[in-house]
Image (tube, rainbow, N blue to C red):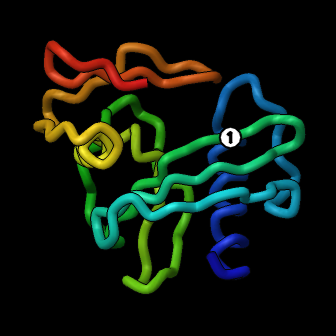
């Protein structure tokens, strides 16, 4: 990861943390130490798995990447899922929490567990400040 990439992800992690309930606000991206950013799926839609230290907490978040203007498959809970914009080898991307989009959640399940899923069958059953649990169909839980 380049220094520019690390700075871009630090800003995105700061935006993510500020939206989480129960977390202290992050003053700015300088308060975020990106430990790892791994591309799980190149292109658009794409996936980048990021681990960062924010204060005394470790934050692990899968970011979804989409072409600007692509609406994706939002969960419909009313919260804007967009966290910012990233520039990488594939150009500009709108970045969001991958677990807030049916298509990227299904892609994440495939990348991590080798489980192909219909995005319409992926739904959250638990969302809190420490974890998110999704179900895929009637037979797989993904935390």
Residue at image point 55% right, 44% down: 61
Q: Residues within 10 Å of mark 1 (few under 14, many from 20)?
A: some
The location of residue 141, given as percent across then percent down, is: 31, 18
Label 1 residue SS: strand
Of the 4 image quadrants, the one containing the C terminus is top left
Residue at image point 36% right, 25% down: 142
Q: How many tags in the picture? A: 1
Residue 126 vertical position relative to residue 109 in the rendered view, above or below: above
**Quarter of the image where one finds residue 6:** bottom right
**Quarter of the image where one finds residue 60:** top right
Residue 60 vs residue 30, the one in the foreground: 60
Residue at image point 64% right, 58% down: 36
The location of residue 1, given as percent across then percent down, is: 62, 75
The location of residue 133, given as percent across then percent down, is: 42, 21
Q: Is residue 62 left or right of residue 9?
A: left
Which residue does the numbered mark 1 point to in the structure image? Answer: 59
The location of residue 101, given as percent across then percent down, is: 32, 42
**Quarter of the image where one finds residue 33:** bottom right
Residue 21 vertical position relative to residue 116 in the rendered view, above or below: above
Q: Is residue 50 left or right of residue 135?
A: right
Residue 91 vertical position relative to residue 94 in the rendered view, above or below: below
Residue 138 vertical position relative to residue 106 in the rendered view, above or below: above
Q: Is residue 140 left or right of residue 118?
A: right
Residue at image point 23% right, 46% down: 103
């Amino acid at each position: 990861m380049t220094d520019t990439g690390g700075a871009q992800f630090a800003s995105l992690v700061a935006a993510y943390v500020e939206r989480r309930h129960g977390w202290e606000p992050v003053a700015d991206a300088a308060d975020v130490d990106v430990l790892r950013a791994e591309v799980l799926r190149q292109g658009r839609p794409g996936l980048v798995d990021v681990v960062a230290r924010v204060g005394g907490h470790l934050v692990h978040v899968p970011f979804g990447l989409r072409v600007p203007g692509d609406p994706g498959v939002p969960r419909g809970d009313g919260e804007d899922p967009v966290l910012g914009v990233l520039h990488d080898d594939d150009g500009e991307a709108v970045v969001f929490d991958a677990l807030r989009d049916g298509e990227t959640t299904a892609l994440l399940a495939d990348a991590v567990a080798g489980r192909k899923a219909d995005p319409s069958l992926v739904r959250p059953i638990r969302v809190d400040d420490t974890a998110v649990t999704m179900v895929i169909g009637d037979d797989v839980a993904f935390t």
